[in-house]
Amino acid sequence: MKDLKLYLSSWADFKFICEEKVKDRCYLTNKNWLRLREYHMERFLESHKAPYGFLYRVKLRHPNIYHTIHCMSKYLHHYKMVRDREFGSNIARRIVTYPNWIGFFKK
C-alpha cells in the first residue's frame, strides 16, 4: 500500500527532525512521542485526499500497524462521523416522499 509506506517514511523523517532539534537540550518521553505522532498524523491526514479511506484500509489490511499507532482509531472515528454527516445531508436532499400507502392494499 503506497499511502502507508508514504506515511511511515514521513513519520521516520519527522521523528529524525525532532530528535535533531532536541539533541543535547532535553529528553523526549513516551508521552511526548505520542503527542508528536498525533500531531504528525493530523497534518498527514489534512493533506491526504481520502483520509477515511486510508485509515480504513490500514485497519483492514494491516491491523498490527493500526493497533500500534494509537491515534489512528481516534482519527478513523472522527473522519467516519464527518463522512456520515456529509453523506446524510446529501441523501436528505435527494429523498423523494411518497404518499402514505397504508390501507391501500387490502388483506
Image: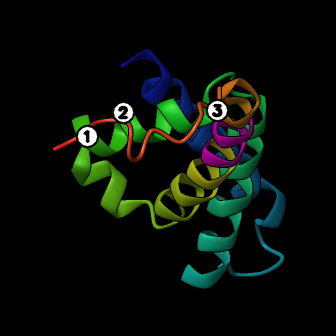
* Element under disc 2: helix
How is this picture coloured? rainbow
Q: Classify mark 1: residues with Cα within 10 Å, few (<14), some (14-19) or many (20+).
A: few
Q: Is residue 90 left or right of residue 2?
A: right
User: What residue is shown at x 53% (from left), y 24% (from top)?
Assistant: 6
* Res. 101 visible in picture: yes
Q: Residue drawn at (65%, 42%), measured in percent from left and top?
A: 88
* Foreground disc of the pair 2, 3: 3
Residue 75 picture quarter: bottom right
* Residue ID for mark 1: 60
Picture disc at residue 57 = 2
Q: Is residue 37 above or below residue 80?
A: below
Query: Disc 3 marks which amino acid?
Result: Thr
Residue 58 figure quarter: top left
Whether residues under marks 2 and 3 lie with C-beta atoms below 8 angstroms apart, the answer is: no
Q: Earlier in the sequence, mark 2 or mark 3?
A: 2
Q: Mark 2 touching mark 1, by CB under 8 A?
A: yes
Q: Is residue 41 left or right of residue 24?
A: left
Task: Specify the segment rendered in magenta.
Answer: 84-89
Q: Does residue 87 belong to the magenta stretch?
A: yes
Q: Nearer the viewer, residue 4 or 105?
A: 105
Q: Residue at point 36% right, 19% down? A: 1
Count the marks: 3
Q: Position of residue 50 (x, y in %)?
A: 61, 26
Q: Is residue 59 above or below residue 37?
A: above
Q: Which residue is mark 3?
A: 97
Q: Mark 3 vs mark 1: which is more N-terminal?
A: 1
